């Protein structure tokens, strides 16, 4: 019985080797006459997921403090199409984070929904005729000192611009759109005046010029991506340029762990959220006795260490 098994095994292996040699010979002969052209790939897609978690517990801690749980999650997806002179770049950013303090309760620490899409047709080597679309809002309600300050589509910024896109390098894009329409949507009536809309105005339209710079640096396991958007409204104080500046930096520790730094800077003179004060630091009140609100620079920074993984071909 053992000899029979050994014989059939030897016969099977011999047949496999012989078949492989014949196939190899046929392939060599065929390759002399034909060249197999790989199917062109026009799409490049990727998905990056990140999640960070921390927990603090204190028992009879002399110097004080509060126990807490915090979590932040981020997902960034890219889907880019390129064929001959036509390009179509798409990017989606989703982020949410919170801190659950056992003393102060639940607080939101990060909340973003950003969608970018750009279509271009090459005019010359590094210059494209382009159309650019952007949506920026958040998912959930935000509170400050117990007061509601934001909500889903409160506010939401929607823009569409037409112009030119200059790409001197693969990792740098400078887009100038002298004809850009922008809509500021505030769903909650109580917060409309804070973001520059009238109390009965869900949508406010702006028409102006936009300059958007997208850059990326990748060195081994370190990557930095930045997006700077400048917008001037022709219809209302065009000298007051609105600024949105996002920076995402990632450093890989291992295949699944990374250090992440994300910053956001906003300056928009239509967003009134700071109390106006005199030189002595006293509040300035309106005719109804309420504090007058003014605009200012907004800045947010998020640093985390956690799980990170990228799927896709770019």
Image (tube, grey):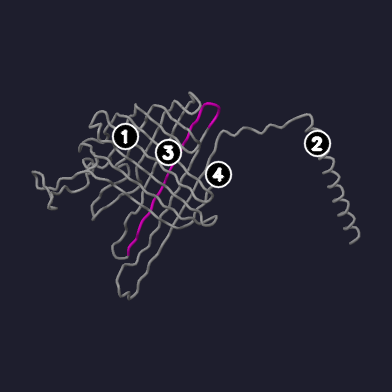
What's the distance in space between the residues labelled 1 and 3, CA to CA?
15 Å
Q: Residues within 10 Å of mark 4 (few under 14, many from 20)?
A: few
Which label's residue is closer to the chain start, 1 or 2? 2
SS at badge 1: strand
The residue singled out by tag 4 in the image is: 312
Which label's residue is closer to the chain start, 2 or 4? 2
- Extent of the magenta region: 82-101
Relative height, residue 115 to residue 104 (above, below): above
The residue singled out by tag 2 in the image is: 28
Quadrant position of residue 190: top left
- Where residue 60 sits in the image (x, y, percent)? 32, 76
Which label's residue is closer to the chain start, 3 or 2? 2
The residue singled out by tag 3 in the image is: 214
Quadrant position of residue 210: top left
What's the distance in space between the residues labelled 1 and 2, CA to CA?
61 Å
Q: Is residue 308 left or right of residue 288?
A: right
What's the distance in space between the residues labelled 3 and 2, CA to CA?
48 Å
Which label's residue is closer to the chain start, 4 or 1? 1
Of circles 1 and 2, the one toward us is 1
SS at badge 2: helix
- Where residue 17 sits in the image (x, y, percent)? 84, 47
What's the distance in space between the residues labelled 4 and 1, CA to CA?
33 Å
Q: Quadrant of the N terminus?
A: bottom right
Look at the numbered discs 1 and 2 and tell me whether their residues touch, using CB distance below 8 Å.
no
Look at the numbered discs 2 and 4 and tell me whether their residues touch, using CB distance below 8 Å.
no
What kind of secondary structure does the magenta stretch mostly adopt? strand
- Where residue 297 sits in the image (x, y, percent)? 27, 45
Look at the numbered discs 4 and 1 and tell me whether their residues touch, using CB distance below 8 Å.
no
Q: Residue furthest left?
A: 287
- Where residue 133 sits in the image (x, y, percent)? 39, 33
Relative height, residue 61 to residue 4 (above, below): below
């Amino acid at each position: 019985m053992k000899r029979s098994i050994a014989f059939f095994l030897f016969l099977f292996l011999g047949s496999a080797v012989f078949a492989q040699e014949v196939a190899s010979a046929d392939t060599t002969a065929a390759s002399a006459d034909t060249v197999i052209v790989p199917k062109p790939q026009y799409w490049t897609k990727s998905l990056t997921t990140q999640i960070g978690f921390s927990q603090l517990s204190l028992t009879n801690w002399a110097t004080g403090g509060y126990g807490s749980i915090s979590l932040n999650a981020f997902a960034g997806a890219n889907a880019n199409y390129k064929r001959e002179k036509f390009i179509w770049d798409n990017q989606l950013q989703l982020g949410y984070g919170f801190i659950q303090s056992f003393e102060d309760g639940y607080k939101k620490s990060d909340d973003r929904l950003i969608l970018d899409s750009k279509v271009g047709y090459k005019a010359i080597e590094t210059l494209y005729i382009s159309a650019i679309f952007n949506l920026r809002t958040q998912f959930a309600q935000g509170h400050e000192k117990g007061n509601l300050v934001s909500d889903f589509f409160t506010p939401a910024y929607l823009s569409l611009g037409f112009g030119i896109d200059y790409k001197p390098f693969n990792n740098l894009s400078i887009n100038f759109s002298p004809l850009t329409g922008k809509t500021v949507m505030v769903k909650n009536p109580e917060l409309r005046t804070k973001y520059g809309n009238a109390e009965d105005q869900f949508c406010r339209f702006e028409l102006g010029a936009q300059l958007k710079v997208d850059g990326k640096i990748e060195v081994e396991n370190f990557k930095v991506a930045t997006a700077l958007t400048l917008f001037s409204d022709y219809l209302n104080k065009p000298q007051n340029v609105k600024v949105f500046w996002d920076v995402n930096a990632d450093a890989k520790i291992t295949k699944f762990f990374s250090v992440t730094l994300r910053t956001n800077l906003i300056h928009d003179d239509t967003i009134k959220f700071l109390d106006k004060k005199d030189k002595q630091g006293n509040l300035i009140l309106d005719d109804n006795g309420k504090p007058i609100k003014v605009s200012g620079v907004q800045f947010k920074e998020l640093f985390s260490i956690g799980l990170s993984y990228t799927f896709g071909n770019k």
